């Protein structure tokens, strides 16, 4: 083992680990550029390397990209990678109150700890964990997805019914396109654009980032504040927070390792499950979802632990644990390395050198992550809105296009962003919609396969509820689902009034009730259309969307009844200039239409310049305008050249 450690810390491998972590962190911080893309873009560099050095570089890129997604999640309320979805729940509220630098440092520490736990599990427990992963069948994947959906009860912005309706909407979006279980076309309504479905990352960018951009231009208030006396890394303060959450970080790291070892699960599910468990067992002063550092610790330790966990089935079984692992597996096959049970014996020098290199890259992520995080925080805090909005909008366009090289994905991103903004103002949080979107295909695939098997053996009940592992996941799901309602349940049994638990909200005005009714009516129409559409599908393609559409209609009806009985409305006041808000999606859609005619470079520069005006609230001198406009153009064109020429990422 000592020889492998010496090989891992050779000058070449040390340099590759450092460069890989830095490159992965930067790429992962850009909304839309996922860890999979970071590895795929840079994998050609490894073809001339030895297998162990190639693995170290790709592992470093992977682990850096997973952590890099936390920057955008904390500072822009937009998950840079899908695995950072749950980081937005508490990271952005911390940043809004002036603790963004602390949140970034906490995320870095948690990521390092989670990465180390995952890598150590790969070193010490790879074969038994790979065998345990094989115990998960379709029904366990289904219940695991349902477990993730149980977070709806905590992410519904005070209105459980709206959260469930939003999750059903997200699940229906996930079913657009060709069914993975029956290959039948669904919910495209004759559009060739929708045949490939709604790309998950593009939808995430739209639902999270576009509403932020719209709100940014609406008022002159600064995006984030940097309080005096709280500048720097705040590392010692972050260490204290992590030590206070030591049980949380260890538990979440173990969850991330276990979920990462499940082929196809990935960091997004690991982060959601870990966050759910942290929220269920949390006893801090701050509520989860309102800026509790424990939420960041849970998510970031779990999603980084999936790096090592995902390599377990990849190397031991030859089955990719996560999408980036599939890219890495392909690169190894190109080099002639055959993964499988014999690799740890026949290719010990490759495997163990890589594992020690992964541990080294994870440790290097601490200084690299803190330095880049401090720069990112100061840049976003100090940047004027007139510069921040055009640059972020430009990055969203690149991120949405780069996944599938489709201009249509950019348009879908913008449309979903507008829908998410409108829904958010009516109390329909984006997070339940995203949960449904992320977990939809996993839940459907597990459900349909289990339903088919149960129907074939004549025992549907036993198929879904007769396996011990499934029952354990169901029990955790029920606990997580009921936990936010526990105070009300106790109040019922102790005959205490709801006023004892807090002041009751005021009755809504007639206009607010009408606005809520219109929102429910829109979702009722969507559910009805989905129900009618499933009548034309075969049973395998129809069973899951029909179930979700029926659930949506039932919860819409319950929400309407509750609205008339209580006249309680959850909504967010629209503040700022409507003209400024409308201009952001309109200018971005105009840029999409102009792309085929003018080309990406010209459109990118024009979009950046035109978005300056709705975002500009401060007065600039002539020199200030020149610097602002010139700076935006230089950034957009510079990033364009970097991606197209330097990294070889295709652009429109």
Image (spheres, rainbow, N blue to C red):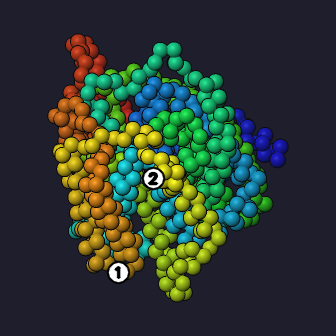
Q: Is label 1 in contact with label 2 (beta carbons under 8 Å)?
A: no
- Say if 442 sits above or below 109 in the image: below
Q: Secondary structure at mark 2?
A: helix
- Say if 120 sits above or below 587 in the image: below
Residue that appears at 51% across and 76% down? 450
Which dot marks residue 428?
Answer: none
Residue that appears at 28% across and 59% down? 561
In the rendered structure, the answer to whether residue 86 lies left or right of residue 46 reads left
Q: In the depicted view, which residue is nearer to us: 139 or 442?
A: 139
Question: Which residue is at the far front?
Answer: 495
Residue that appears at 49% across and 26% down? 99
Which residue in the protein does label 2 denote?
Answer: 153
- Say if 339 sits above or below 386 in the image: below
Residue 603 position in % (x across, y down):
24, 38
**Is residue 324 visible in the rendered structure shown here?**
no
Residue 646 position in % (x across, y down):
44, 38
Of tags 1 and 2, the one toward the viewer is 2
Instruction: Kindly report the distance in space between the C-alpha atoms of the residues bearing marks 1 and 2.
Output: 33 Å
Which residue in the protein does label 1 denote?
Answer: 538
Q: In the depicted view, which residue is nearer to us: 278 or 448?
A: 278
Tally the marks: 2
Residue 364 position in % (x across, y down):
65, 34
Image quadrant of residue 578? Answer: top left
**Is residue 588 visible in the rendered structure shown here?**
yes
Q: In the depicted view, which residue is nearer to us: 231 or 574?
A: 574
In the rendered structure, the answer to whether residue 581 lies left or right of residue 384 reads left
């Amino acid at each position: 083992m000592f020889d492998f450690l010496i090989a891992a810390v050779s000058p070449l491998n040390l340099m590759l680990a450092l460069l890989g972590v830095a490159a992965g962190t930067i790429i992962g911080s850009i909304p839309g550029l996922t860890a999979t893309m970071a590895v795929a873009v840079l994998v050609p560099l490894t073809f001339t390397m030895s297998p162990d050095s190639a693995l170290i570089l790709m592992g470093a890129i992977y682990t850096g990209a997973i952590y890099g997604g936390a920057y955008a999640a904390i500072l822009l309320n937009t998950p840079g990678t899908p695995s950072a979805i749950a980081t937005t729940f508490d990271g952005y509220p911390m940043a809004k109150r002036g603790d963004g630098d602390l949140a970034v440092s906490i995320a870095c520490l948690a990521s390092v700890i989670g990465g180390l736990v995952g890598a150590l599990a790969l070193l010490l427990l790879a074969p038994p964990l790979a065998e345990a992963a094989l115990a998960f069948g379709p029904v366990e994947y289904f219940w695991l997805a349902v477990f993730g959906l149980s977070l709806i009860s905590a992410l519904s912005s005070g209105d459980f019914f709206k959260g469930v309706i939003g999750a059903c909407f997200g699940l229906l979006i996930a079913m657009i396109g060709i069914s993975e279980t029956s290959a039948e076309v669904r919910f495209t309504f004759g559009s060739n654009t929708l045949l490939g479905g709604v790309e998950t990352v593009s939808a995430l960018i739209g639902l999270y980032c576009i509403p932020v951009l719209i709100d940014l231009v609406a008022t002159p208030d600064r995006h984030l504040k940097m309080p005096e006396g709280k500048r720097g890394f705040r590392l010692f303060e972050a260490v204290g927070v992590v030590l206070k959450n030591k049980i949380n970080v260890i538990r979440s790291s173990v969850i991330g390792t276990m979920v990462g070892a499940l082929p196809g699960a990935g960091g997004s599910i690991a982060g959601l499950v870990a966050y759910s468990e942290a929220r269920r067992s949390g006893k801090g002063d701050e509520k989860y979802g309102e800026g509790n550092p424990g939420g960041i610790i849970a998510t970031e330790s779990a999603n980084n632990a999936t790096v090592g966990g995902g390599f377990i089935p990849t190397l031991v079984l030859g089955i990719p644990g996560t999408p980036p692992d599939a890219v890495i597996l392909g690169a190894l096959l190109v080099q002639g390395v055959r993964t499988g049970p014999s690799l740890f014996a026949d290719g010990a020098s490759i495997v163990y050198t890589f594992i020690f290199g992964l541990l080294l890259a994870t440790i290097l992520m601490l200084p690299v992550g803190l330095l880049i995080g401090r720069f990112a925080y100061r840049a976003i805090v100090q940047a004027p809105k007139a510069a921040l909005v055009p640059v972020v909008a430009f990055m969203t366009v690149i991120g949405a296009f780069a996944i599938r090289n489709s201009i249509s994905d950019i348009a879908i991103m913008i449309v979903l962003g507008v829908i998410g903004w409108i829904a958010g103002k009516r109390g329909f949080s984006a997070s339940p919609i995203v949960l449904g979107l992320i977990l939809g295909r996993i839940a459907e695939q597990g459900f349909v396969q289990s339903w088919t098997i149960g129907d074939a053996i004549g025992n549907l009940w036993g198929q879904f509820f007769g396996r011990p592992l499934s029952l354990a996941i169901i029990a955790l799901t029920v606990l997580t689902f009921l936990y936010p309602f526990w105070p009300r349940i106790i109040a019922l049994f102790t005959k205490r009034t709801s006023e004892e638990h807090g002041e009751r909200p005021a009755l809504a005005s007639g206009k607010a009730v009408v606005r809520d009714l219109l929102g429910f009516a829109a979702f009722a129409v969507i559910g009805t259309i989905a129900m009618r559409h499933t009548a034309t599908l075969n049973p395998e393609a129809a069973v899951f969307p029909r179930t979700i559409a029926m659930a949506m209609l039932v919860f819409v009806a319950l929400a309407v009844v509750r609205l008339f009985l209580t006249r309680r409305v959850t909504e967010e006041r629209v503040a700022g200039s409507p003209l400024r808000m409308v201009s952001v999606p309109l200018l971005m859609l105009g840029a999409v239409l102009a792309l085929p005619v003018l080309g990406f470079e010209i459109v990118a520069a024009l979009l950046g310049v035109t978005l300056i005006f709705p975002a500009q609230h401060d007065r600039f001198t002539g020199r200030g305008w020149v610097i602002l406009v010139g700076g935006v153009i230089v950034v957009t064109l510079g990033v364009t050249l970097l991606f197209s020429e330097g990294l070889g990422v295709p652009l429109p």
